[in-house]
Amino acid sequence: MADFWGSDRRARRIAYALAVAGACLIAWGGAVGSLWVMGVGVWLFIAAFLVDLIRRP
């Protein structure tokens, strides 16, 4: 039988990790004044949102 709940937990952990990494990069980019670091953080945050959006039925 497939491990349905394990894959759900894995997707949730991935979404949280992407969101935290994105938020950290956005804050760090803002602190040092680097737009490309902030841009990478924004893309990671968008990826976290999409993973969470797709994960939910």
Image: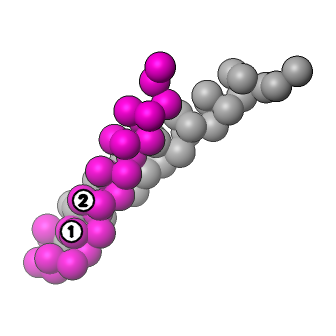
Extreme residue toward the right, this view: 1
Identify the amino acid type marked 1: Met
The residue drawn where x is 62% and y is 30% is 9
Q: What element carries label 2?
A: helix
The answer to whether residue 41 of the structure is visible from this angle is: yes
Judge from the rendering whether residue 15 lies leftward or rightward of residue 40; answer left or right.
right
The residue drawn where x is 24% and y is 59% is 42
Image: magenta residue range? 30-57
* Magenta span main SS: helix
The residue labelled by disc 1 is: 38
Identify the amino acid type marked 2: Val
The residue drawn where x is 48% and y is 48% is 17
Mark 2 burial class by Cα count in 10 Å: few <14, some 14-19, many 20+: some
Judge from the rendering whether residue 47 lies leftward or rightward of residue 4; answer left or right.
left
In this view, 20 is above or below 16: below
The residue drawn where x is 29% and y is 51% is 46
Give the quarter of the image for residue 52. top left
The residue labelled by disc 2 is: 42
Along the line of sight, which residue is nearer the eye, 48 or 21?
48
Q: Is residue 40 magenta?
A: yes
The answer to whether residue 24 of the structure is visible from this angle is: no
Mark 1–mark 2 distance (CA, rounded to whole Å): 6 Å
Along the line of sight, which residue is nearer the eye, 25 or 6?
6
Mark 1 burial class by Cα count in 10 Å: few <14, some 14-19, many 20+: many
Cβ atoms at labels 1 and 2 below 8 Å apart: yes
Q: Is residue 34 magenta?
A: yes
